[in-house]
Image (cartoon, helix red, strand yellow):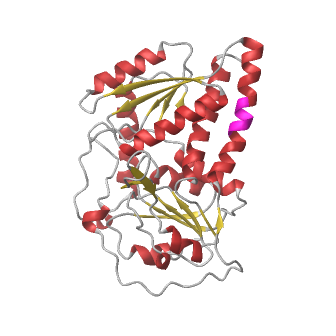
Amino acid sequence: MVWMFGIEIWEKMIPVRMMRKMVWERSMNKLSRGLSSSQIRKPRPPSLVSLDLIDEWSSTFTHSHSPPIQKSTVNNDSARIIDGRSAAEEIKSSIAVEVSRMKESIGKVPGLAVILVGQRRDSLAYVRNKIMACHEVGFRFSIAELPESCTEDDVCDALSNYNKDASIHGILVQLPLPQGREPLFIPCTAKGCIELLLSSDVEIVGKRAVVIGRSNIVGLPTFLLLQRHHATVSIVHAYSENPEIITREADILVAAAGVPNLVRGSWLKPGAVVLDVGINPIEDPESEHGYRLIGDVCFEEAVRIASAVTPVPGGVGPMTVAMLLLNTLEAAKRALCFT
């Protein structure tokens, strides 16, 4: 059995508390070696119970006086739209073929389970997309919905129950969890970002990249993956001084702060590639669910400056779900010894 947390797959069974303690100790050792006392700034860091640094952009950040928006030097009237839906559909089509082959050959299909805690609007939207995607490719899908008041033991019990189910090959704990229950797992949103860059023929090697946001769900793993692809990477967070100056140096900008329209056109280097990870629910009585989703990037301004930009919705989100399906397929293949 494999476990999938935040959309990555674990191939060994490790008790949740033990795994969390191991990751926490390794991470803190690295952090203590990598930071000097002069680099530690106010405000005081959060409790060591969690390494997910919560950036309160709305209460600490205000836009400074930015220079006028510059027109991109790229010979286009507007930025190329990086179509996450199209890229994800190609991946899902390949997965559906494999699932059909598995069903015909051995009579079994991959199974994905999701554990959802609470009723966050963005999480509900993510889960709806995952359910639809599973149906499209032929996966078995199961969901355990827990109240926000549930205990850590409740979540562990749900994990244990799904782990005993031989028809489930990937278990996803939908992140973020309520405050105080943040597990430390690497999600596939970061992987989806890199896949979008590669499939869009965006050069990463040697380029200057900036990630806005440092959560362990998106920001930090995206930072690490960009480094692995040989980019020179910086992170901007709520306490960074002059963030717009830093972002204007980026050839590749990944916005994952969770603040609607945080990134304005004046923050962008002409010709930059912009990936908008933000999923921010905005009240809209005319929408089906009473709200609509917008990103961290002011799309109307970015499209005039960037060479390529992802929309919200329809950009990074579909690729995240596609990576989830791809990992579940691979987990099922290994579990069932199917090649």
| Left or right of 134, for residue 48 | left
User: Which one is in front, 280 or 336?
Assistant: 280
- Please tell me in which quadrant of the rendered image residue 146 appears: top left
| Left or right of 64, for residue 294 | right
- Which residue is found at the position 49% from the left and 55% from the top? 277
Image location of residue 273, percent across then percent down: 61, 67
User: Which one is in front, 85 or 306?
Assistant: 85
- Please tell me in which quadrant of the rendered image residue 117 appears: top left
Image location of residue 44, percent across then percent down: 22, 58
- Which residue is found at the position 38% from the left and 77% from the top? 242
Residue sitting at the far front: 286
Image location of residue 181, percent across then percent down: 30, 36
Does the magenta run of residues contain 237?
no
Residue 339 seen from this side: no
| Left or right of 292, for residue 268 | right
From what the image shows, is residue 170 above or below residue 162? Answer: below
Over which residues does the magenta segment extend? 92-96
Residue sitting at the far bottom: 68
Image location of residue 282, percent across then percent down: 37, 56
Q: Quadrant of the N terminus?
A: top right
Q: Quadrant of the C terminus?
A: top right
- Secondary structure mostly seen in the magenta stretch: helix
From what the image shows, is residue 108 above or below residue 12? Answer: above
